[in-house]
Image (spheres, rainbow, N blue to C red):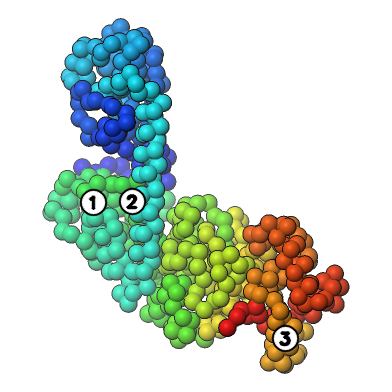
Amino acid sequence: MLMPPTPPAEPSSTPPAPPVSLAALLARPDLGLRLLAGSEDVPLHWVHTSEMADPYPYLLGGELLMTAGVQLTDPAHYVERVVEAGAAALAFGVTPVYDTVPRELVAACERHGLPLVEVPPRTPFTAVARALWRLMAEARLHELRRVTEAQQSLAAAAARPAPVPAVLGALASRLGGRAVLFGADGTESAAAGREVPAEAARALRDLAGVLGPRPGGPASASGDGGGLRLAAYALGGGEGLTLGVATERRGPGDHTIAGVAVVLLSLLTAPHRGADVTVRDGALVRLLLGAPPAEVADALGPGPWTVVHARGGDGTPFAAASLAAALGTPLVAADVATGARPAGPGAGATPATTPAGSGPGPDTPGAVHPGTVRLLLPSSAPVTAQQGWTLGASAPVAASELAAGDAQAARALRRAEASRAALVRHRANGFASLVDRDEAAAYARDVLAPLTEPLVETLRAWLSLHGSWDRTAVATGLHRNTVRQRIARCAALLDRDLDDPDVRMELWFALHSAPNAGQRG
């Protein structure tokens, strides 16, 4: 039976944490709870304590209601009201009002199928509530890990030679069901996962037919059929394609996982995509997954390219894809280490890492920090500020130099965040380009030889921010005193007065001429 279409972001009374089974709470030996009526196989979304004679107005549904029966005068009517309010279960504490759970209350719960739990005198209600919230926190952590692993699996699938079937297969595997790509006419164009009953297959096709390319039409719909939970999602691109998913059960994170697959499939099936575009997207994903730039340079093309790092967005699964669309590129990857909602090829590829060969570690200004979206644009494409985002853009680089561009974009983003600018660009060397590059690099290496890599990166950030201690601390993630100590150490090792503008200019020239200064070996 189909349900009315449901928007992807429809508000729900269910909290973001997954529900916990009553059985898990009963299994806690420290609580000593005992089931007196009903089934233990019910989900608990939260816990509420009330001594009201009629708790109905104060219940949201799905909770474990705890009471000591202070105003319990009519157990049958009380249970009717609790069931009418949608409570998941009733917990009754014995003493100080009752020595045992009233038999009339047990009988009423049995008639209505409401689970009834006895709470012993030694167990305070707060202990039950704390135990439930801990179980919910553990379930939430498990669900976040499941979503993260699924996103990484989908990103890897999008980089394979046949990305559409691979993404469908990864999605079906992660959700434990079947994933189908329907054409605009309702025909099944690709599918993966286990076979489903004919009734479920027809219901899924009908559900997908509810959606379509109609302006303002629903973006998703859900329902049931053939004993399975069904969901359909309209793909972007204007081709009328729809993703259908059939599973035995629906987890809290399934919608997020499906949302990532929708973005990937929308990009992979977009009408403007040619074979060369598909190859380039896959090349970027492989690069962000850690492949050496030399392995993907041929697929990406000679360039030049601009690397953009961004932080911000509205936290939705489609934020990164919207940013990519605004900048005019499908080449996007989003980090998911902190729960940022990734989108596009490479979503969840390598949290808090840089492409192979890029050099800096996670604690240096050139590293990619959690929550960063990375994009690749032809250098001819304009990079403009976007509302709700902070952007850092590299100088134009060849495909073989994307690692350097990635580091430039990371540093530019750090400067943007420190200066509260919407967009900061990495600037090329200007007058420095008039000097022979090899000679300048050799001189710069000699000048900076006494400094270690952490000192070089701190000095680079400090000079780029005009010697501001506070802004450098923000840009590097260091304490203000640590910045002062490192700059003082640089001055001592270089035996130079860093307050002298000529010295600062020479060091800035050296840092740009020898970008790998400070790296040993």
Any part of residue 410 in sight: no
Relative height, residue 280 to residue 125 (above, below):
below
Label 1: few (<14), some (14–19) or many (≥20) C-alpha neighbours in 10 Å:
many
Relative height, residue 99 to residue 288 (above, below):
above
Secondary structure state at the residue bearing disc 2: helix
Mark 3 highlights which residue? 446
Q: What separation in Å lies between label 1 and label 2 (alpha carbons)?
A: 10 Å
Residue at x 70% of width, y 82% of height: 449
Comes first in the chain, label 3 or label 2: 2
Relative image position of residue 426 (x, y in whole percent): 67, 73
Relative image position of residue 101 (x, y in whole percent): 25, 14
- Residue type at numbered disc 3: Asp
Q: Is residue 372 left or right of residue 264?
A: right
Residue at x 39% of width, y 14% of height: 51
Mark 2 highlights which residue? 254
Comes first in the chain, label 1 or label 2: 1
Label 2: few (<14), some (14–19) or many (≥20) C-alpha neighbours in 10 Å:
some
Secondary structure state at the residue bearing disc 1: strand
